[in-house]
Image: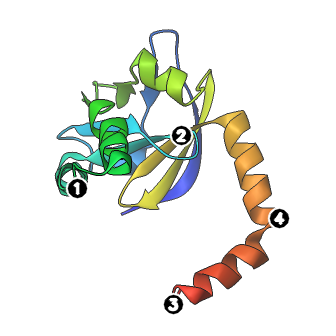
Amino acid sequence: MFIGEYSHSIDQKGRMAIPVKFRHDLKNGAVVTRGLDNCLFIYTKSEWAKVAEKYANLPIAQANSRAFSRLMLAGAMDVELDGQGRIILPEYLREFASVKKNVVIAGLYSRLEIWDEEVWNKYKGQTEAESGEIAERMSELGV
């Protein structure tokens, strides 16, 4: 289970340290892909298999399904932890998420999200300001 919020930086080669508490879960590799809301998603290999199967089974006849599958599946890349607990984020994914030097790694139970620090702070501030409205909408979903 991934939870918490961690600040890290990316070096010139695109390497980013994974928080120590998550390294054990990612020791057999991971998959990083385009996320939503201008971030990247990182999944364990086993969780990615479940998620990718759902994307692959979306109705191919529907344009939105094809587009979403392409976004998530074609953008995915296998990554491995190096001896220092770092992964390399491919340049095309860093560009997609506007990731520069400082990042926030957010644990969201079954995945990690990688955010550019400035983008995260803006998103988080907006979400916190709207938390009452969001909670009300979530209650409609039974949460």
Dividing the picture into quadrants, the one containing residue 84 is top left
Q: Which residue is mark 3?
A: 142
Tell me which residue sits at (17%, 55%) in the image: 57
As drawn, the label of residue 39 is 2
Q: Which residue is mark 4?
A: 129
Tell me which residue sits at (38%, 49%) in the image: 64
Q: Is residue 138 left or right of residue 35?
A: right
Point out residue 107 in the picture as x, y percentages from the top left corner: 48, 55
Q: CA distance from mark 3 to mark 2?
A: 27 Å
Q: Pointer 4: residues within 10 angstroms few (<14), some, or many (20+)?
A: few
Q: Is residue 15 left or right of residue 79?
A: right
Point out residue 113 in the picture as x, y percentages from the top left corner: 48, 46
Q: Earlier in the sequence, mark 3 or mark 2?
A: 2
Q: Is residue 31 left or right of residue 111?
A: left
Along the viewing direction, whichever of 67 and 52 lies nearer the viewer: 67
Mark 2 or 1: in front is 1
Vertical side of 14 occupied by 67: above or below: below
Q: Earlier in the sequence, mark 3 or mark 1?
A: 1
Q: CA distance from mark 3 to mark 1?
A: 27 Å
Q: Earlier in the sequence, mark 4 or mark 2?
A: 2
Point out residue 4 in the picture as x, y percentages from the top left corner: 54, 58
Helix, strand or loop under label 1: loop
Helix, strand or loop under label 2: loop
Q: Earlier in the sequence, mark 2 or mark 1?
A: 2
